[in-house]
Image: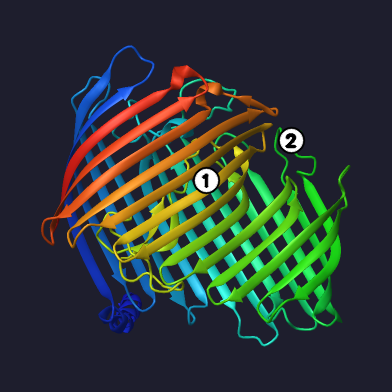
Amino acid sequence: MQSNRVPTLRFATLLLAMLPAMARADFDIKPSLSSAIYAYGIKNQTVEADEGMAYEVLPELDLSFRGSWLTTSLNLQSQNLVFDDAQRDNENLFSYRWSGSASFLNEALDLQVGARQSNRTASDSTSRYQDEISATGDLAKVESQFASLSFSHDRFDWAMMDFGLNAVRTKSDQSISVFDEQSGEQVSLENSSLAGTFGLRTRDRNRKFFWGFEGNATKTERDVRESQYNRRAQGVIGVPFFWRISMIATGSVESNSNIAGASSVFAQYRNHHSVGGGLEWKITDRSWWNITYNKVNNAKEAKEYIGTTFELAPSRRTKLTGSLDKRFFGRTAQAKGTYSLKHLRMELSVSDTVGSLLGFNDGDLESSLFVCPPGVTPGLDNCFQPPTASYIPGQGERLYNMTRPASDLSEFLVVRRNVSYLLGYDFNRLKLSSRIGQRKDQLIERNAVREDKFINASANWQLNARSSLTLSADYSDLIYQVDGKDSFGEMTGIVKSVSLSLKREINKDLSANANLKRIEVDYRSDSRDYQENRAWVGIEYKF
């Protein structure tokens, strides 16, 4: 009997220890029910006219919990659609989004977990303009789970250390890729990625002698194709030269596992080694900039190159960090910049990452320009600009989502370059949000490139205390290239859309909306041209 009591007593002790934290925690439940009626007319190259109506009922539940060290939120949706045309079948689409975080050791150790499920068309070319209402085929169900653990130690006077682990699993019940030479019916795919990072560096870059080391490793597992490993390490050492100038030495090593077809595209795919030296200027106590002359040891041509790294903070409102270097795929750039005023926020981001297309299907981009309160549909009309740049979302709040360009649901490995500029403005009764960007996917196993240039802009005007008007416009220019030549003309072209939405709060629990939307798709091949006009009205009740 004593052996059975010991676990029970331990559990009871743990529960009693957690009660004070639970008592200080906030827990929220926000159910809602919305309904809408859609009328649409679609013109494409088929002979039959595509006109009809759709009826939607969408129950939703928001749960949030926030304690002193634990935060979690869960959103559940069940979208029920009934169509009255012959091209579409009735749908019942379930989606969810869960995230949780816990902090330990005075916030030095951070744990993040989450899961989500969504529905979309499998092809990136059609997902740019078709959604649950306009899609005629079965939608793909995409599930993903992630977990990350990060630790940062900055209590030493002479050094800082950090490390992190990150695991992501993504699964889709359909798959498709325009670059795949294989034909046949779509199959389900499951990809996973496991990554680890480590960093050790001097606490202050302004010391006379400074140094730093960073390393990371990633493993991408795929269902059909080979798994891929990537390992990378780089370091820097600096010694005083004169005045605020230091001499620095740099080095980097990167290696990849062998996969079929990669060596013909990238000459240094398997191994890439470089060393270099240069000068670093300490502009201020918070800003520095260096330029290095580097040499790739195992390259057959273009062995030498110029690299640079910088961290600039001219004021409390402005910060810009970045680098220009070389990796196995060629030139690589990283940059992150922020500019924050009371009513105006700007963000700049440039990144190069390697992974599978299915693994990159991670939903929308969360921007800190706006924060959405709990229990509301994320949108410019419902969200607000945080009072400070370091604002941490409160209980149930989440960052405003900006739609990313979609990717094919396939497991091709790509080098993805993202460039985006975001702007947010919130003053009086006007809110503005815009995003200008470019995303380029260079396939590792094919000599092929997919490039998408896009602009998203939204404006919201608060007409009075209960009514608001939102105008949104999107532009996307998609290009496919194979062996350096433009290809897939039936999927290459421009997508333009504009929408207008009027929202009215009838009382604190009930709101109504009326919407108009126009979409035009102009591909190089007329066989895929597409136009759509849509109008719908809806209501939402919050319990």
Residue 234 to residue 244: above or below: above
Q: Position of residue 289 (x, y in %)?
A: 73, 69
Residue 282 drawn at (x, y percent)? 74, 77
Q: Rate crowding at label 1 as few (under 14), some (14 to 19) or many (20 or more) other CA atoms within 10 Å.
A: many
Name the element at disc 2: loop
N-terminal label among 2 and 1: 2
Q: Amino acid at mark 2?
A: Val
**Helix, strand or loop under label 1:** loop
Place of residue 187 in the rendered image (x, y in percent of width and height, measured from the top left): 46, 29
Question: Which quarter of the figure has residue 323?
Answer: bottom right
- Outermost residue, bottom direction? 157
Of residues 411 and 540, the one nearer the viewer is 540
Compared to residue 254, the image places residue 44 above or below, namely above
Q: Which residue shows up at 24% across the image and 60% down it?
A: 375
Q: Name the amino acid, label 1.
A: Gly
| Residue corresponding to mark 1 | 359
Residue depicted at x 40% and y 45%: 143
Dividing the picture into quadrants, the one containing residue 13 is bottom left
- Residue 252, visible in the rendered structure: yes
In this rendering, the answer to whether 273 lies above or below 428 is above
- Residue situated in front as seen by the camera: 520 or 109: 520
Looking at the image, can residue 122 be seen?
no
Decide if residue 494 is on the left or right side of residue 230.
left
Residue 265's disc is 2
Report which quarter residue 58 is drawn in.
Answer: top left
Say above or below: 197 vs 35: below
**Quarter of the C terminus within the rendering:** bottom left
Residue farthest left in this picture: 507
